[in-house]
Image (cartoon, coloured by chain):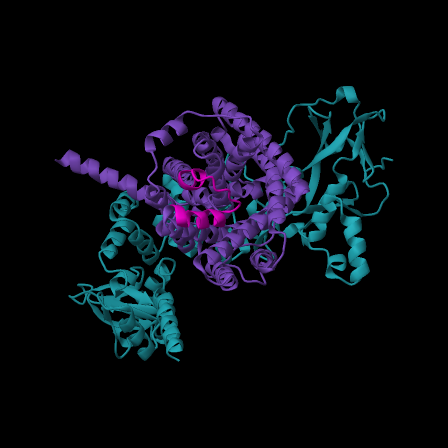
């Protein structure tokens, strides 16, 4: 009994697994085939069915795609299309280009749950007949979905009801709302994720969490997901990965995309990455990069990786000692985007030798017309490029600074070290020490 | 001079890349020589002498062909075999395949633990303590290690298979005769001979290997540009495993077969070797059995739980906590605990259980191979890396032979199940 599209006037939920194989008849109520697939629009918040795929034949299956407008009615029991059998053209393979196929792209596939921020496998799909449309409501990732697909649901349900009537298995379906689902099917042409990411919540996931999601994916999906993001997001994500994954990812990208990311990377992160590569490879990569970033990186690569020179970043804010407060504030504003730590401002002489430092707060409360040295701190602590992590940590702790200037042997300011640059190294040291103490005890 | 240095340098570079890629192929192939394999080869050598040696040449080929397909799928799709089966063939196929795989692998794990118990007997140690110690060690190794460190331990374990080669040389065989026997196939329609031949081929290719191999290639992140090195890894593995098996047969043929000693297990073989080939040979043989059993017992439970969780879409991985991946840890722990416990329970019909697992393996293998062939010829998944037509003919022929053999093995196993 084919109902008019939603003519019952009420919303009705149905599982995709129950719809598969439902008989479809033509305008003359002659059997056309069985429901094979539902194609949905990959854009928009609600995934409306755009077309049905009907399969006919037992051994040599043939497929016909029927637009939603040409569907007379569809219900869990049966479906009817408006055309006659003779007018429906069948082909050897199901066709879908831009659309998402529920059968091929969603069911049994891995998708990202942007709400819980993890990768899940879809056991079943929960559809809703609403008004004239068929929309995807949830995906089922629970055990019950597996039993339903296997055809054991009634027995397992009965068994569970017998043993524990209030089991979570029965009362709390393991559904994830479609709006949180980010499908991972790859567009074969652009090699990016098929769904428009800006509409989904993937963008809102912080880079550290997104990087963990990425690691749960197969390499090909990892790459597709990465390529779907814009350059800023890519750089953010890249910084979160371990060296091995960074390397693997760059190898898979084409040269231009890879170099773009490296150009965008903060110098300290760039040094970490290039420093871990064999020297000839690092030099080859730097030859491809923008001269400015490459020069900065190559000078930093000369330092030992655990010394201040190896850890520092060269993006910081400095002003000449002759500048006024007003000028200094303008420089801060201009450089804010690029520099890492904006709360510390360093004052240098004509030879770029460090003469003092100040903070953003001091600049704001000072008189705009005064010389910048008026706002300088009484004492400026600096470290040498060859100093080690322990010394840096000691000074940061003693003076409660979050950023320290780094000078070379001629006391020229060459970079700064912020607390996050040494933080993970400190954690490692502290952890090792704690373990040693525990061992003694 | 410079040219020579350049050439040397590039040779070192190749060797360095190979060393970094090497692992999955060699490890997977070597796990094949587990307690069950050693038993089969020992019995083959003891009862049929060198007349089965020729079989190792086609086995090398078959092993390579099948392993290579699993690896190619891993490199191209970046997904495990269970993942691909689930995504392409749906829940039903996956669920039943996984159920049978668990049964088959559980039997295999038990066989490994009984191998450990047998080697405890041989060394005059307490069965109970050694099995318990090994079970704890295996559990700890995987839960506390990562892929890299575990792989190193496993590669190191592969080295100990050399002990069989040493014991082969101790028996001072007539190499000319052995070479002739290896290169000139002899065949007999004798019932017992056929059973043995099927057994030897059957133990070499097990369903779990394809899942394990593909998963470890994915985990290692091998890329297409390094695929040639990885193929070398598989070739080396296929050769090494068969050379070791070859030597086991040689040892038993040289000693036990000559003196007409009948054996049932690898333990019998080791014990019978003592008076015939000396204490060193006995010790090497016994140590080889222990190493092989422990090695395989470390890999099977992990491989099983990975595969099952992958296929069913459950959280998995040793870097997850129990709360995050309960199914994974439950399955992993249960296989080890039950596998070890069953071996220690006195008067349990071990032989019957192992035959049962052999049956499960036999049922599963043709399905896995056919699924693999359908996956690897899927253009949407593999792109230009689908099998070439000639290769397809070769593989299909191999699969058909394997299917027929495992069907025969099933019938025979069923008969012997009825007898006991």
Image colour assigned to chain B:
purple
Horizontal side, residue B6 vs residue B374: left or right: left
> Hey, which residue is sitting farthest top in the picture?
A86
Horizontal side, residue A110 vs residue A289: left or right: right
Vertical relation: A56 (above or below) A120: above
> Dividing the picture into quarters, in which one does residue A324 lie?
bottom left
Quadrant, the N terminus of chain B: top left
Position in image of residue A288 (x %, y %): 29, 42
Vertical relation: B407 (above or below) B288: above
As rendered, which of A170 and A291 lies closer to the eye?
Answer: A170
Position in image of residue B406 (x %, y %): 59, 34
> Dividing the picture into quarters, in which one does residue B153 lie?
bottom left
Horizontal side, residue A355 vs residue B314: left or right: left
Position in image of residue B301 (x %, y %): 54, 53
Q: Give the residue displayed 85% in from the left and 24% down from the top.
A: A28
Vertical relation: B329 (above or below) B174: below
Is B265 part of what is drawn in magenta?
yes
Of all chains in the rendering, the one displayed in cyan is: A
Q: Give the residue displayed 20% in from the left and 64% down from the top.
A: A352
Q: What range of the chain is rendered magenta?
A: B252-276
As rendered, which of A210 and B77 lies closer to the eye?
Answer: B77
Horizontal side, residue A81 vs residue A394: left or right: right
């Amino acid at each position: 009994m084919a109902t008019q599209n939603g003519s019952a006037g009420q919303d009705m939920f149905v599982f995709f697994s129950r719809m598969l194989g439902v008989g479809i008849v033509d305008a003359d109520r002659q059997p056309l085939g069985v429901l094979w697939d539902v194609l949905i629009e990959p854009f928009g918040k609600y995934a409306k069915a755009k077309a049905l795929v009907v399969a006919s034949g037992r051994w040599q299956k043939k497929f016909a795609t029927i637009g939603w407008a040409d569907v007379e009615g569809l219900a869990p029991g049966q479906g009817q299309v408006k055309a006659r059998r003779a007018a429906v053209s069948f082909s050897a393979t199901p066709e879908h280009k831009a659309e998402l196929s529920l059968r091929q792209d969603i069911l049994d596939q891995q998708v990202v749950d942007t709400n819980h921020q993890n990768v899940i496998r879809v056991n079943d799909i929960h559809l809703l007949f609403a008004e004239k449309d068929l929309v995807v409501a949830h995906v089922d990732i629970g055990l019950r979905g597996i039993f339903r697909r296997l055809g054991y649901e009634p027995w397992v349900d009965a068994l569970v009801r017998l043993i524990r009537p209030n089991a979570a298995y029965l009362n709390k379906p393991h559904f994830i709302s479609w709006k949180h689902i980010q499908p991972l099917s790859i567009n074969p042409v652009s090699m990016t994720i098929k769904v428009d990411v800006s509409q989904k919540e993937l963008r809102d996931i912080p880079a550290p969490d997104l990087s963990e999601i990425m690691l749960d994916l197969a390499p090909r999906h990892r790459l597709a997901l990465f390529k779907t993001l814009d350059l800023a997001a890519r750089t953010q994500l890249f910084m979160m990965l371990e060296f091995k994954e960074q390397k693997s990812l760059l190898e898979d990208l084409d040269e231009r995309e890879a170099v773009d990311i490296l150009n965008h990377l903060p110098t300290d992160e760039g040094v970490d990455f290039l420093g871990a590569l064999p020297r000839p490879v690092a030099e080859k990569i730097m030859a491809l990069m923008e001269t400015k970033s490459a020069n900065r990186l190559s000078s930093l690569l000369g330092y030992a990786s655990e010394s201040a020179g190896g850890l520092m970043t060269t993006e910081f804010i400095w002003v000449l000692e002759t500048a006024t407060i007003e000028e200094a504030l303008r420089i801060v504003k201009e450089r804010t985007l690029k520099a890492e730590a904006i709360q510390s401002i360093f004052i240098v002489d004509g030879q770029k030798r460090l003469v003092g430092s100040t903070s953003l707060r001091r600049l704001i409360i000072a008189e705009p017309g005064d010389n910048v040295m008026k706002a300088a701190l009484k004492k400026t602590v600096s470290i040498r490029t060859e100093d080690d992590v322990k010394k840096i940590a000691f000074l940061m702790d003693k003076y409660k600074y979050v950023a320290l200037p780094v000078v070379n042997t001629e006391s020229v300011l060459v970079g700064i070290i912020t607390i996050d640059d040494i933080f993970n190294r400190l954690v490692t040291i502290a952890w090792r020490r704690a373990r040693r103490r525990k061992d003694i005890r | 001079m410079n040219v020579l240095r350049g050439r040397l340098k590039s040779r070192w570079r190749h060797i360095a890349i190979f060393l970094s890629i090497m692992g999955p192929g060699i490890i997977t192939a070597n796990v094949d020589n587990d307690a069950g394999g050693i038993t089969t080869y020992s019995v083959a050598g003891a009862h049929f002498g060198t007349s089965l040696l020729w079989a190792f040449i086609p086995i090398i080929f078959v092993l390579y062909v099948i392993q290579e397909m699993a690896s190619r799928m891993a490199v191209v799709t970046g997904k495990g075999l269970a993942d691909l089966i689930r995504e392409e063939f749906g829940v039903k196929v996956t669920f039943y395949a996984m159920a049978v795989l668990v049964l088959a692998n559980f039997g295999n794990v038990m066989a490994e633990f009984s191998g450990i118990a047998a080697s405890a007997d041989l060394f005059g140690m307490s069965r109970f303590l050694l099995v318990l110690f090994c079970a704890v060690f295996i559990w700890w190794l995987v839960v506390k290690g990562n892929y890299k460190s575990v792989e190193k331990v496993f590669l190191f374990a592969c080295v100990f298979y050399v002990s069989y080669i040493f014991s082969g040389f101790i028996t001072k065989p007539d190499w000319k005769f052995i070479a002739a026997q290896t290169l000139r196939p002899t065949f007999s329609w004798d019932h017992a001979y056929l059973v043995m031949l099927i057994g030897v081929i059957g133990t070499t290719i097990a369903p779990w290997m394809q899942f394990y191999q593909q998963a470890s290639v994915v985990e290692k992140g091998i890329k297409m540009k390094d695929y040639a090195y990885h193929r070398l890894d598989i070739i080396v593995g296929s050769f090494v495993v068969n050379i070791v098996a070859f030597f086991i047969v040689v040892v038993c043929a040289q000693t036990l077969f000559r003196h007409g000693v009948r054996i049932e297990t690898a333990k019998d073989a080791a014990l019978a070797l003592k008076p015939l080939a000396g204490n060193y040979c006995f010790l090497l043989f016994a140590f080889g059995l222990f190493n092989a059993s422990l090695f395989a017992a470390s890999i099977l439970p992990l491989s099983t739980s990975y595969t099952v969780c992958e296929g069913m879409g459950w959280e998995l991985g040793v870097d997850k906590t129990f709360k995050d991946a309960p199914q994974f840890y439950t399955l992993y722990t249960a296989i080890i605990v039950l596998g070890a416990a069953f071996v220690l329970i006195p008067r349990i019909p071990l032989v019957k259980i192992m035959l049962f697992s052999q049956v499960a393996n036999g049922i599963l293998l043709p399905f896995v191979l056919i699924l693999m062939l359908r996956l690897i010829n899927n253009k949407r998944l593999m792109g230009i890396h689908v099998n070439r037509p000639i290769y397809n003919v070769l593989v299909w022929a191999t699969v058909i032979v394997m299917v027929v053999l495992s069907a025969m093995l099933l019938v025979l196993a069923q008969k012997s199940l009825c007898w006991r």
